[in-house]
Image (tube, rainbow, N blue to C red):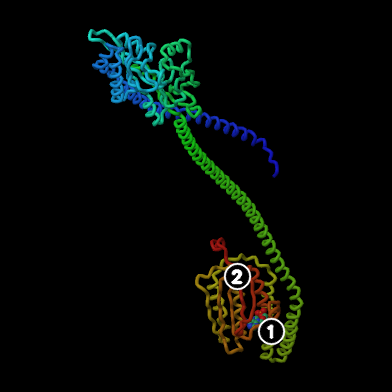
Amino acid sequence: MGVRWVTEEEAPLKRSSGIAISLGLFFLLGMTIAAEDFASGYYLKQGLSRAQATLRLTIQGLEGRLQRFETLPILLADDEIIRSLSSDLANPDLRARANQWLKQRSTTVQASDIYVMTLGGVTVAASNFDKQDSFVGQSFDYRPYFKDAANGGKGRFYALGTTSGVRGYYFATPVRSNAGTIIAVIALKIGLDEIEAEWRAQEYRILVNDPEGIIFLSTDPVWLYRGLLSLTPDRIAKTSTSRRYADADVSELPHISSVEHNIPLIRLAGDDGAAREYLVAKQLMPTANWTVQVLLDTSYLRGQARLATTALLLFMGIAVSIWLMLRQRRLQFAERIVLQEQTKLDLERRVIERTTDLERVNHQIETEIAERRLTELELRRTQNDLVQAGKLAALGQMSAALSHEINQPLAAARNYADSAAILIYRGEGAKALENINHIVSLIDRMATIAKHLRNVARKPDAPLLAIDLASAVAEAVSSAQARLHAVGAIVSVDLPMCLPMVEAGPVRLQQVLTNILSNAADAVESVQDKRIAIAAANADDRIALTVRDHGPGVPPAIAARIFDPFFTTKRVGSGLGLGLSISYNIMKDFGGDLRVSNDPDGGAVFTMVFALADAKKMAAE
Ligand code: ADP
């Protein structure tokens, strides 16, 4: 795996994202602590209100139980047997009766013990007289309840039995003589173990401590006779004088008290030795001067708080994930938009580039076209020059032929003239006239040659015009009518409607058309099929006018030469061999062409190609 270096641009980016992550983690930590604190507070308060409800019920139960026995000693003290015994405390009969009676009563009222004491505190009769740890003969003068009752008050006391070692609550009342003097004390002890047994069935820990902070009722036996307050000598003295806890080893209970969300908490080890945290609901029970405390294990509440916090964090996590996902989507969407925008700009730039390229190419093409036009013009001019030069070259050629053509008739004319002179001298006028006619015809022939040559040699300067071919053809047919009629030619003209105008010189065009028509007439003269067809077609911005006859056609051997000046296959005196040569040059002057071919069905086809007249010339027309 290659090492990837962080670039200079990436470094601050990474740093800022690192800071963001750290801040996010701190925030998360803060949120977790705050959420847990809030949830703990909520669940602890809930627990506290439940514990307080239990506390109320517990106190009601305790008070109810104590109240049940509250008046019982007074009733017992009023009984005849007790009063009799109290009047005669040393009487063994009365003692025995009282013992039996007390035992019976004790069972009936479900008291732990009932016993009668002298004003010296010595027990003279007791419900447990027949038990091993009988109170009879025992002195309880140190017990506060005895003292209170002996002094005429109501004795109330809770303590661990010094004889029985059983915890109990003591009620004592004085036994008065008929005269109203206090003669003895009767006490009733109720057990408290049952209450604890009832409490243990609940989920709460319950303990009851005295004003000195010593626990004497508890769901957990290990807490019994342990002090929640520090055992000062004063507190120890108070307890030991009354021997409240008999020989029990009273010591401080190790615990840690704290307050959370105004809820008192305590941490202490229970029967199983494991330290737990409990929330505390406590209340003073004034009747007995006890503090009842209901403890609720906070582990379940804290578990619930943690669960709620986890749920909240989970929810927050999901919310943050959704938010991040949406943010990511939004960023992606924005990126896509930017990308699209970039692509669009790129496309536009490329279009502009292409357009510029195209414009440049177009410009190049236009330049090339202009150059080509110029070249074409140059070419045409050169062609024209060449044609003209060709004409001049032909003229040279022609001069040779011409001297021959003219010398012959001249020599002939000379002969005819000489003969005519002799004939006139002899008086043979008629024959002389014949000779003169011959001379005239020879002169005519030479005049014709001269006329044609004039046309060939002269560079045409007559402007070209827009010509309607239909009218031109009609005019030419009419001009050649005499000749056509003489050979019996059948002429058909088939020109398309709306044939565009062509570029030509009207007089010279007539010369070409008449020449070709008269050649066609010559061709059909000696054949059966006398048809001559004139047609036109429009192709590639050019008009092709064809003249087709049904004569012998042009043999391939001479096809290349028929446009040469003075080429003729006709007998002497019939053709000069200049017609096609002149016509060819005229067509070239028009910017057109003249071609010859043979129809597959026989007969020659002369094709005159014309350029279309351009709009400007038509307007000039
Ligand atoms: P001329 O008609 O005086 O001979 P042209 O230059 O008109 O001179 O014709 C040259 C030759 O072309 C003709 O002698 C003839 O042999 C040939 N020619 C012209 N037109 C036709 C035609 N329609 N059919 C056959 N041959 C033709």
Answer with the quadrant where ligand 1 appears in the image: bottom right
Residue 441 visible? The answer is no
In the rendered image, the vertical position of residue 115 relative to residue 7, given as above or below: above
- The residue under label 1 is 569
The amino acid at mark 1 is: Thr
Answer left or right for 194 relative to 394. left
Q: Is mark 2 within 8 Å of ligand 1?
A: no
Q: How busy is the neighbourhood of tag 2: few (under 14 within 10 Å), some, or many (20 plus)?
A: many
- The residue under label 2 is 610
At x 49%, y 26%, the residue is 269
The amino acid at mark 2 is: Phe
Tag shown at residue 305: none
Q: Position of residue 37 (x, y in %)?
A: 47, 27
Element under label 1?
loop
Answer left or right for 159 relative to 508. left
Q: Position of residue 140 (x, y in %)?
A: 38, 13
Most foreground residue, 338 or 101: 101
At x 67%, y 72%, the residue is 585
Quadrant where the N terminus is found in the figure: top right
Element under label 2?
strand
Q: How busy is the neighbourhood of tag 1: few (under 14 within 10 Å), some, or many (20 plus)?
A: few
Q: Is mark 1 within 8 Å of ligand 1?
A: yes
Q: Position of residue 339 (x, y in %)?
A: 57, 45
Most foreground residue, 408 or 294: 294
Residue 614 visible? The answer is yes
In the rendered image, the vertical position of residue 315 relative to residue 486, given as above or below: above
In the rendered image, the vertical position of residue 474 relative to residue 17, given as above or below: below
**Cα distance, mark 1 to mark 2?**
28 Å
